[in-house]
Amino acid sequence: MKLSSVAGQRVLFVMATDHEYGQHLRTRLTPLITGVGPIEAAIGTSVCLQRLQTAGELPDLVVSLGSAGSRRCTLGRVYQVESVSWRDMDASRLGFSKGVTPFTDHPAVMELPTPLTGVPRASLSTGSDIVAGDRYAEIEADLVDMETFAVLRACQWFDVPLIGLRGVSDGPGELDGLSGWTELLALLDERLAEAVDQLYEALPGKGTQPFNPKGGNIPR
C-alpha cells in the first residue's frame, strides 16, 4: 500500500483483491488490498487508517475501487457510487429500519460524492453474498459489491471522505463460476484507470476538504 499524492492531497485506494489490480492501474497507484467481503474490508481499512493516523499521514480521501455486479447497468462500464447500503443488516424485528445497524446513527442508505463529469452514477448495495439470478430482484440498488459500505464506515470513524468507483463485471444470467467474474476484469482495469485519471484531474488543491458527501460524515 502506498498513498498517492495528487495536488497536495493524500489519496488511499482500497481494493478487495489483486485479481482486479491489473496492468493499467499498476502504473497509476498502489492500493491497500483488504481481502474479499465486508468483514475483511472493514478490518483492513480500519487498521490501515489507524496506522496512518498514528504516523500523521491520514489520507485526505479514500477511493473504493473494483468490480461490481448489476442487472441494470452496462457490462464493462465504470460507475461512480452515488449511494451505498448494507443489504445484510436487518434488525427490523427490533424496530430498526432494514439496513440500519442498531444503536448507531446512520441511515440505511448513505450518499457519496460523485465529482467526475462524464462518468455515470449508480446506487450500490454491499453484502457478504455473491449475487446472481433471482437474488437481484430482492435488491433495490443498481450495483452490488462486497466491500464499499464497510470501507465507508471505517472512513467515517476517521472523518475521511470516500469515493466509490466500480466497473460492472457480471450480472446478466447466472454467474458461471470464477471465470464468470474474471472474464471482464482486464477491460475494467483499463476503464477504472481512465476514471482514476479523471479523479486526479478533479482533485482540489491542498487545504480544501475534497468531495464531502452531502451533510458531511455520519456521526459514529
Image (cartoon, rainbow, N blue to C red):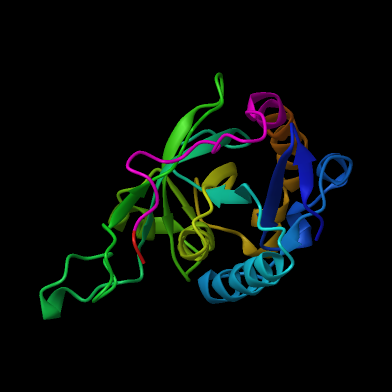
Please identify the quadrant where the N terminus is shown.
Answer: bottom right
Outermost residue on the bottom side: it is: 94
Q: Nearer the viewer, residue 196 or 177?
A: 196
Residue at image point 58% right, 44% down: 166
In the displayed structure, 185 sits above or below 119; it is below
Q: Which quarter of the rendered picture does the C terminus lie within?
A: bottom left
**Residue 192 location (% of width, % of height):** 70, 37
The answer to whether 21 is drawn above or below residue 35 in the figure is above
Left or right side of 172 for 40: right
Residue 183 visible? The answer is: yes
Q: Could you tell me what secondary structure mostly forms the magenta stretch? A: loop
x and y percent of residue 78 in the render?
60, 35
In the rendered image, the vertical position of residue 115 relative to residue 100, given as above or below: above
Residue depicted at 56% across the width and 19% down the height: 118
Residue 120 on the magenta span: no
Magenta-colored span: 198-218
